Amino acid sequence: MAYTIGLDYGTNSVRALIVRCSDGKELGSAVFDYPSGNAGVIEDPRDPLLARQHPGDYLEGAEATVRAAMVSAKQVFPEFSAEAVIGLGVDTTGSSPIPVDKQNRALGQQPTWREHPAAQCWLWKDHTSHAEAEKITQLARAKWPQYVAKCGNTYSSEWFWSKIWHCLNVAPDVFEAAYSWVELADWVPSQLAGIAAPEKIQRGVCMAGHKALYAEDWGGLPEKAFLAELNPKLADLRERLYEKALDASHPAGRLCEAWAERLGLKSGIPIAIGEMDVHYGAIGCGVREGTLVKVIGTSACDCGVVSMANTVADIEGICGIVPGAILPGYYGVEAGQSAVGDLFKWWVEKVCGGDVSRHAALTAEVAAQRPGESGLLALDWNNGNRTVLVDQRLTGCVLGQTLHTTAAEIYRALIEATAFGARMILERLLEYGVPVERIVCAGGIAEKNPMLMQIYADVTGREMCLSGSSQTCALGAAIGAAVIAGREAGGYDDFAEAQAAMTTLKPETYQPNPVAHEAYNKLFALYQKIHDAFGGVEKTADLGRIMKDLLQIKEDARLETAK
Amino acid sequence: MAYTIGLDYGTNSVRALIVRCSDGKELGSAVFDYPSGNAGVIEDPRDPLLARQHPGDYLEGAEATVRAAMVSAKQVFPEFSAEAVIGLGVDTTGSSPIPVDKQNRALGQQPTWREHPAAQCWLWKDHTSHAEAEKITQLARAKWPQYVAKCGNTYSSEWFWSKIWHCLNVAPDVFEAAYSWVELADWVPSQLAGIAAPEKIQRGVCMAGHKALYAEDWGGLPEKAFLAELNPKLADLRERLYEKALDASHPAGRLCEAWAERLGLKSGIPIAIGEMDVHYGAIGCGVREGTLVKVIGTSACDCGVVSMANTVADIEGICGIVPGAILPGYYGVEAGQSAVGDLFKWWVEKVCGGDVSRHAALTAEVAAQRPGESGLLALDWNNGNRTVLVDQRLTGCVLGQTLHTTAAEIYRALIEATAFGARMILERLLEYGVPVERIVCAGGIAEKNPMLMQIYADVTGREMCLSGSSQTCALGAAIGAAVIAGREAGGYDDFAEAQAAMTTLKPETYQPNPVAHEAYNKLFALYQKIHDAFGGVEKTADLGRIMKDLLQIKEDARLETAK
């Protein structure tokens, strides 16, 4: 028997998962909460936008979780043996760049810089770089439009160049001390592989393409002239980054002696290339051409792949289309919704003043309502719109309230709003020729909220499948490791084979109810109207019938119920 | 010294107020809760639209309150004497029609009909007649457009003809037993005056003009041909109603012996013509040409008067312009907002799940916020829009929510929405030449919510004065009595004199803050955009900038605060 290990670096903790290659069986896992900062996040009380992490936590976490996961696997499956682990894979949050020295040591690990926030990992949700992001966006739009054409013409404050440039602006000492910068997804594998020079790090195309403006079309990272217009020091830095980023058919390296000893594994086993958590998550859900994976949690991420044998047009409003980003040989297509679980949490906690238990109470009140019965319609933009409008400066909207409207009805309307948002993405993908024959969902909300899942099925008119694993990201990383280890070692020769053997779906699925789908089609038409009106797509909107149409749909639904 | 008494018939109780004519001093008052039904309202658990009242409660209440109010007046002001009461006035809810027999006895008072809901008073908020209202509206629009031209082209289910026709449709036995129908505001005075034949009742033009399609322009009540198209029996009924309705320069009658004895008053003193509560309320607030009275409670009512020496154009979207409806010699102009206090109550109780004490807590959280600081914008249409769109089938809207938006911020946004609605009415009146030099507010919300009053001042850019009395309706009825009694008896010869002597303003007023007004001008422009878009006024709305404009206003406000 052969096994691989997936290491999944989340925002507050890291998880190791031991997986059996033959069938994807998850034998054991362990979680390590990052010890630094507030639940692992270094914050600044004076600046709510700042979010950093201590890089040492990542390494400590790797050791603690891999060892603990193997102990638990051994207890339940005595035949498991660390000797039989044939590879490791790593997925992480992103863009989470780390400044490193010439020996590929994180600055934050060194005594001089240990307490300096700018010398730590700049966590994905750090938004201190918004001014830099705006300038990058302006410059790209004006002179290098191709750089932002595939990400909605907007470069984000969450991304690589914004953060590094902000460091140069506010902490030039750190910038000067950093020889290079590495994404967390690339840095952890490079440490495990004992790579002691930044130039030798194998960088994943997933982070490079989605976050660092990397594309082979224009020769890799953005050209020096572009970076020099931002700041000549960024152009210099380009020399100390990388020429070529790699897809998951390439290894990130092999486990070095020192780390083999720390983890209790064989040295020399391959380490898969690092990818973003949701991308390995998509692999763990069985993504292939024709399958759309939806990871539904605090926000939602949609991933699909299209063979590179075909050409994919720029899909208007889709944030990222990157060759090789998810599966080798395929364009990775990524879309998403900025708030899903967060939207419901906001309603329950910030508005209704309830705690977590309130979700169930509100759900019970409206679970039996028919579509449209509340007369409400909402937009799911409390955290902006990531796809298809790609506009963070959009906000929420609730329409159709009367003096009888309840908190639970608005709660359901917010769920429906996210379902309409999901349908907008689905229709945009289909419109541009991305095939979607199957939808597989994963994530906390997908697993725990049957009312939401049924609404998604009813709104889209599509069956909603659920991933068999609850740890799809770690599982995907383990699959990446099995492929990079290869068939001879007990793994697989390609992802299709590995996914067929190692991923499953839950037997139960959510089937669309045709009557509900019909009713939701009417509501979706109204959603599209306000979506286009407030999103600025439609400059001459006629909304004068919307409230009456909602009342009509409401009356029809109540008549149905009364029957 | 001379005194008059105002009797104010509300939805759940009646109040008597003893007023000194020389200066309007309120000497004593008493309240009587109607004993029948649920808090005075006869309901039907199978039909939430039904709301009736037992007419006997009104008479019992008159006796109880007048006697009790005189006792309390005597205790505090020993010089008060029932002998010195020179007149009575009555105001009531409306349209609240009562079926009566040939002797002007309410059917509901008679043993045969005592328990029949259709034989009682049909309370203003009874909405069982919505189908009839719709048919009346259709017929009038098609063939007698003048009938609905002054009430937004819509006849309401709350009004006289809808209710009587519905009675004919659902309770023909009651309809047949009724010799005539009388508005509560006319029936109570007619009882006190001992009028024993419906033809002899003096009907007020206020109820007739606002609720019964009465206008001298077309010869009084709607013509028989119109009523016959509804139902020939309604055309027959017209014969048993009235030819001419009167303004407040005419008495409703004189106190009869029997009632003089029941009340402990002199017989023969005059009774003022009955008017709707808010109209006598406007008089009690000192309404005159140039003064707009706003009664702000669960809903809001705006009243103004324009001299009949001028002509008043039909004001688009203003529900009622009736000659003599408020003050003799003036057009009464009435506008309103369907939900004000009710909107805040909905938010606190139905959505936030709080009780009455929550209002203060939410207010405290946001009282210090600057205009626009929340980034929110709302429409105040949870109960439809009465003025200027005159459309009950409009609903609420809240825009601009983020994941940080709080319940208190939405609470404030709803208050601001009602202020914007109030400004829409004010601007519409000014646009059509109704002079507004002074705004006087009354009602529970106006008295108890300083944050709201300051917002109203800031949004409109106008000083908000408060009525000196907390019982403006009863006071206005007492003023009506003082005028009808006349100077010789110790009263006044006209309303201007009486109001000058008997009404006051509170010394403190709400002054607009110019900086806040400036900020609200920006928000009001956005309110107008969504008002016109969702109200169907603007068929080609461009709303694509609204959310961004709100964010910009929010950021500007926060920068100001940070200074």
Image: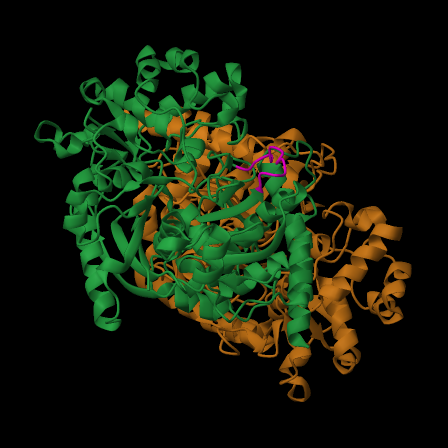
Chain colours: A orange, B green
Q: Residue A72's x, y, as percent?
A: 35, 65
In this orientation, does residue B50 appear?
A: yes
The one of B35 and B388 positioned closer to us in this rendering:
B35
Q: Is residue B14 above or below residue B512?
A: above
**Location of the N terminus of chain B (image quadrant):** bottom left
Task: Residue at 23%, 71% (x, y): give it.
Answer: B78
**Region in magenta:** B307-318
Task: Residue at 8%, 31% (x, y): give it.
Answer: B111
Q: Is residue B315 magenta?
A: yes
Q: Is residue B425 left or right of residue B337?
A: right
The one of A236 and B508 positioned closer to us in this rendering:
B508
Q: Residue B387's x, y, as percent?
A: 53, 40
Q: How many marks?
A: 0
Q: Residue B333's x, y, as percent?
A: 53, 41
The one of B188 and A338 positioned closer to us in this rendering:
B188
Task: Residue at 88%, 59% (x, y): give it.
Answer: A226
Residue sticking out furthest to the left = B111
